[in-house]
Image (cartoon, rainbow, N blue to C red):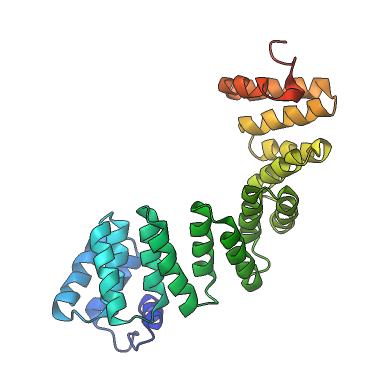
Amino acid sequence: MRVIGRLGRIFGKQHDADTASAALRTGLAQLAAGRHAEAIATLSAIIERDAANPVAHYGRAQALTASGQHAEALADLDRALALDPHAAQPFRARGLLRRKLGHPDEALADLDRAVALAPTDLAIRQDRAMTHRLAGRFDAALADYSAALDLAPDDPDIWHARGICHRKRGDEAAAARDLSETIRRNPQDAYAFYNRGLALLALGRHADAIPDFAQTVAFNPVFAEAYLHLATCHAACDDVAAARIALSRALELDPTLAARAQGEAALVGYLGE
């Protein structure tokens, strides 16, 4: 019943538990439980009787998407939006499906509409940020991540995502600041330590990067690239013994990293010893 109430509110209509048919309740419950084939069958039967039911079209689109029937899902989302063009979530769903299908411009058009309809919806804002980021539009992605942080200032994942975006733009100092905020809020995030280490390494702050790469491999002892970066930092700080240990571990885990190690100026002379 909570599922129906939620989907009813998506469309701003009274498709809630008090007015929805038993069949609609069943179909949406099947969708929520991941029983997609059953949901498709149940919701299809509803649509045969009431083709103007936007909730049924939206619900079936979700089940079709999960089942890999993308063309059919797009058709249902088109129909849902034709019936109710002021519903943000179908625009979001269609945008994400279009992104998945490799159509970033169309995806962003849908997500722009979803943001306009629901400007305080955190998930929609993050979805658009990721879509911008995947399309290489890092300034737009940063704007969306910043807006998301206005909505959820203590969410470590958003700080992390914005930090990565700063790195993509080449602003390593801003990246290090955002990743520090991530770690402050979630000190168990191994990749935040790793990515901050990369930012510090790019800034030439080898000594500062060492604790981050050391923490990364403490969390993930088989992360070969982290050992390679740790070796680089130790070598740059003239800690020959630590550099050799880290490099040896990196190559033990992934021998193909030898070629990259040869390209690291700080590691010249370490290979083959």
Using the rendered view, name the quadrant where residue 163 is placed.
bottom right
In front: 196, or 102? Answer: 102
Q: Is residue 27 visible?
A: no
Q: Is residue 49 visible?
A: yes
In front: 1, or 210? Answer: 210
Task: Tally the marks.
Answer: 0
Q: Residue at x 38, y 82 (%)?
A: 86
- Indicate whether 246 appears above or below 93: above
- Indicate whether 237 appears above or below 255: below
Using the rendered view, name the quadrant where residue 27 is placed.
bottom left
- Indicate whether 237 appears above or below 180: above
Q: Residue at x 81, y 20 (%)?
A: 241
- Which image quarter holds the N terminus? bottom left
Q: Is residue 226 left or right of residue 82?
A: right
Q: Residue at x 61, y 65 (%)?
A: 143
Q: Residue at x 14, y 75 (%)?
A: 48
Q: Is residue 136 left or right of residue 143?
A: left
In the rendered image, the residue lying farthest to the top is: 273
Percent of width and height locating residue 126: 53, 64
Percent of width and height locating residue 196: 71, 46
- Which image quarter holds the C terminus? top right
- Indicate whether 128 appears above or below 236: below
Percent of width and height locating residue 122: 54, 70
In the rendered image, the residue lying farthest to the left is: 48
